[in-house]
Every structure is written in structure tokens, then in C-alpha cells.
Amino acid sequence: MRVSKEYLPRLAEYCRVIESSPESRRTGYAKRLYNELNWLKRLYFLRYFRFDSIAPPPFRKQDIEPFYVEARQLRRLLTAVAAGIEKGMKTGGQEKKTPCNGIDNPWDPYVFQVPNPISMRLDILLGGKDSKKKTNAALVFFSLSVVTVLDHLIN
């Protein structure tokens, strides 16, 4: 992500300045870095973030989508898939292997090709050892819940 090329070096430098001495926090350089970090937060992550700016953004907003836009788009896509699954549930669901709009295999168990800490946590949250609850449909609904909360917090 190109934003990290803008944000992380400034954050590292600001942390270095703060850790060096208490007097350095009040320098013009430290204040400028802090202002740039706040502008990056606002432009790419938290659109309603407010701060006392000492100057306009010192860089142009790049051609990437801000994170809050991507979160909103992901929420819309998952909502459409979840609506298709709900419609499939009303017409027979898992027992009849009803097809759903937006997803090919909602009633099949989900498979993570590479097990990792996140996939292990999802296994626990979505039913533990009960394989009937570990479906792609359940994964879509759980993901939609998480993205909805995230979208609400940042938008």
C-alpha cells in the first residue's frame, strides 16, 4: 500500500524525535512531522478526524483509494452476498443445497489453504469442532459483521 510509504517513515521519525529528549518535542521539526501524520490519518484512514493544523497537507493526495472508501465498498459487496444467502436460506438452504446469488458454494465447509492464527480463531468462533456450522455462508455473515463494525467506526 502506497500510504505506508508516506505514513511509516514519518511515524518512525516522529517516534525517534519524541524519544530523544523532552525539549525536542517542541521544535518546529517535531510539530511539522506531527502535522503531516495527522494529515495522513485524515486523508487516508479517518475522514472525520479533526486536529489543529499548522499548515495545509505538504503532499498531494495520491491515486489510491482511502481506507474508509475500501471498507465501505467491502461492506456493500458482502451485504449483497449475504442477501443472496438469506434468500437461499428461505428457499431450502443447506438441506436442499439451494444455489445463492453472489456465491457458488455457500453450504460447503470453508477451507483455508494455509492455516494461520486468524484461520484458527475463525474456526473457534464459527463452531469449534461442529463442521455443519463451518460453512462459507457462516464465514460471509461473520465477515460482514466485522466489516460493518469497522465501517461504522471509521465512517
Image (tube, rainbow, N blue to C red):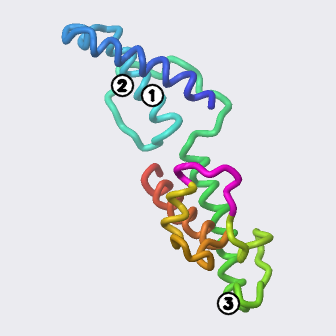
Residue at 53% from the left image edge and 61% from the top image edge: 122
Q: Is residue 52 above or below residue 48?
A: above
For the N terminus, which image quadrant? top right
- Tell me where residue 35 appears, x and y as whole percent: 38, 22
Q: Tags 2 and 1 in contact by the CB under 8 Å rule?
A: yes
Q: Which residues are magenta?
A: 111-118
Look at 72% across and 84% down and name the residue there: 88
Task: Give me the C-alpha separation between circle 2 and circle 3.
Answer: 53 Å
Residue bearing mark 1: 39
Instruction: Give SS at disc 3.
Output: helix
How many angstroms separate mark 2 from mark 1 (CA)? Answer: 8 Å
Percent x, y of residue 102: 76, 69
Q: Nearer the viewer, residue 130 or 37?
A: 130
Disc nearest the viewer among 1 and 3? 3
Q: Is residue 149 above or below residue 43?
A: below
Q: How many marks?
A: 3
Residue 46 left/right relative to 59? left
Determine the residue positioned at 20% across, 8% down: 23
Residue 117, magenta (yes or no): yes
Identify the amino acid type marked 3: Lys
Which residue bears the numbered disc 2?
53
Between residues 138 and 90, which one lies in front from this camera angle? 138
Circle 3 residue: 90
Secondary structure mostly seen in the magenta stretch: loop
62 vs 21, left or right, is right
Three-letter code for the amino acid on which mark 2 is drawn: Ser
Judge by depth and name the residue closer to the eye, 40 or 147.
147
Where disc 2 sits, the SS reads loop
Q: Amino acid at mark 1?
A: Trp
Q: Earlier in the sequence, mark 2 or mark 3?
A: 2
Earlier-in-chain disc, 2 versus 1: 1
- Residue 12 location (% of width, % of height): 42, 18
